[in-house]
Image (cartoon, rainbow, N blue to C red):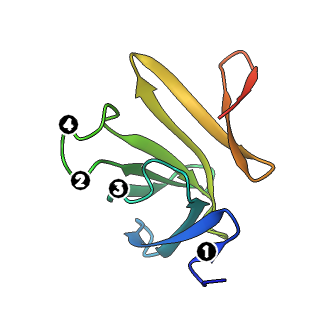
Amino acid sequence: MSSLMDGVFIKRRCYLKLGDGTVLSSVRLRADCFFRHWPFKDATLDDEGWVRVRAVPSLPRSSPVAEVLLHIDPMTGLLMEYRYIDDGVTRIFTLMDAEYREVSGEGNEHAG
C-alpha cells in the first residue's frame, strides 16, 4: 500500500505553518472527503492545542459549499472533525470508528 494511503484514509501533503513555528506537513483524512484536494488557508492552533484550518475550493463558485472548517489532531495529523454550511444549515461531521458521522446540535448521530 502506498505511503500516501492507509486503508480508506489518504495522507494529504500540505505545509501548514502555525503561529508558534510548528509546521504540519500532512493531514490524514478519508479518501471520500469531497474537499480533499481543496487548498488550505488560515491555519491556527486553538486554545486546546488543535489545528484549525479552512479548506476552500480552487475555483470560486465551483462548489455549492464556500468553505469547510477542519479540526486536526496536531500529533497524528488526523482530521477529527469538519463542518460547513449547506443551505443555511451548519453540518458537522466527527470521526467515529474510521468514518465521519454527522452529528446534530441535539446529540443525534447520522451516518455521513
Query: Which quadrant does the N terminus fall into?
Result: bottom right
**Mark-to-mark CA distance, 2 and 4:** 9 Å
Between discs 2 and 3, the one toward the N terminus: 3
Q: In this figure, which residue is indicated by the disc labeled 1?
A: 5
Quadrant of res 64: top left
**Mark-to-mark CA distance, 4 and 3:** 13 Å
Asked if disc 4 and disc 3 are in contact, CB closer than 8 Å, the reply is no
Asked if disc 2 and disc 1 are in contact, CB closer than 8 Å, the reply is no
Q: Secondary structure at mark 2?
A: loop
For discs 3 and 1, the disc positioned in front in the rendered view: 1
> Dot 1 surroundings within 10 Å: few (below 14), some, or many (20 or more)?
some
For discs 2 and 1, the disc positioned in front in the rendered view: 1
The circle on residue 61 is 4
The circle on residue 38 is 3
Q: In this figure, which residue is indicated by the disc labeled 2?
A: 58
Percent coordinates x, y for residue 18 in the rendering: 42, 66
Label 2 sits on what residue type? Answer: Ser
Between discs 4 and 3, the one toward the N terminus: 3
**Mark-to-mark CA distance, 4 and 1:** 29 Å
Label 1 sits on what residue type? Answer: Met
Residue at 40% x, 69% y is 16
Residue at 57% x, 49% y is 47
Q: Secondary structure at mark 4?
A: loop
